[in-house]
Image (cartoon, coloured by chain):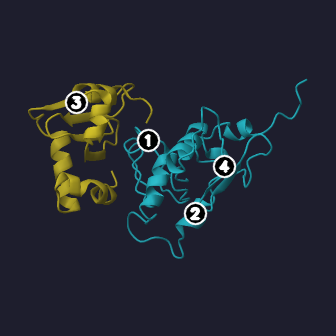
Amino acid sequence: MTCPVCAYRELPYPPNNYNICPCCGTEFGNDDQLVTHFQLRQQWIANGAHWFFGDPPVNWDPYVQLSRIPVQAIRLADIAFFASEDLGIQTGGGLLNSTELTWGNAFVVERPDHSEAVNSSTELSGFGRVSDTASETRPDPVPVC
Amino acid sequence: MTRDIHFHKHGRTLGIADAEEYERTADGFMSGVIERHTQQCQRPNRGDRLRFNTFDRRFGAEASQEPRFLRTFYKVEQGHINYHGGEQAYFGWECGRIDL
């Protein structure tokens, strides 16, 4: 199973019922009561993205691990939070007013009016917060007259 | 409960020195006589049995179906309690949770 916070793929139990990820230390059902997985991920990165419990796997690299997170797994609300809180960008109720947002090596989200989310993948399993964010960032394929 | 990782996460805030003591304390909290300021409930659909001490904010959860085991034991952050409007409201919310 994959941790929805840090993308660690060897989670030995489901991310619920107070199980704790040995990589990022998230206790599911407790730590994610009031904040999203995206916010927890930000906190983990801000604190150095250290391995939480025991010894990390050989050659473990948190940023390589984070780069596996598909852009489809990012919720609209998370992106709005990211934009407003981290970059000081006023979203004005829209999805993104910035020209682009980057976050580590993980993803790039470009302006929705002339592009679509890039660097996406089809790796969606294990993420409970998959939403239709990507579709909201794509232009309508059929022009409306 | 995977004891060691839970101790690693919560031991310090509970003032507990080692994993064995953490397990003993959690067992005593969940299985002993219900202390003053401690409340107990069971989540819907034969869900977890919970205890919460409104004075020192200790919280424990135990799987109520066989095999019974401790899921967690920790001190609830004051911010979580405040978010729900106080100790009673917080525990009421915990008791009603079916999202786990």
Which SS class for mark 3? Answer: helix
Q: B2 and A49: which one is in front?
A: A49
Q: Most extreme residue toward the bottom, as rendered?
A: A59
Give the spatial CA distance, label 1 vs label 3: 20 Å
1 or 4: tag closer to the N-terminus: 1
Residue at horizontal 68 percent and vertical 51 percent from the top? A100
Q: Report the amino acid beneath label 1.
A: Val
Image colour for chain A is: cyan
Q: Position of residue A132 (x, y in %)?
A: 68, 36
Disc 4 on helix, strand or loop? helix
* Residue B75 in which image quadrant: top left
Q: Residue at x 48, y 59 (%)?
A: A45
Q: Residue furthest left?
A: B36
Q: Position of residue A38 (x, y in %)?
A: 52, 47
Badge 4: chain ID: A
Residue assigned mark 1: A35
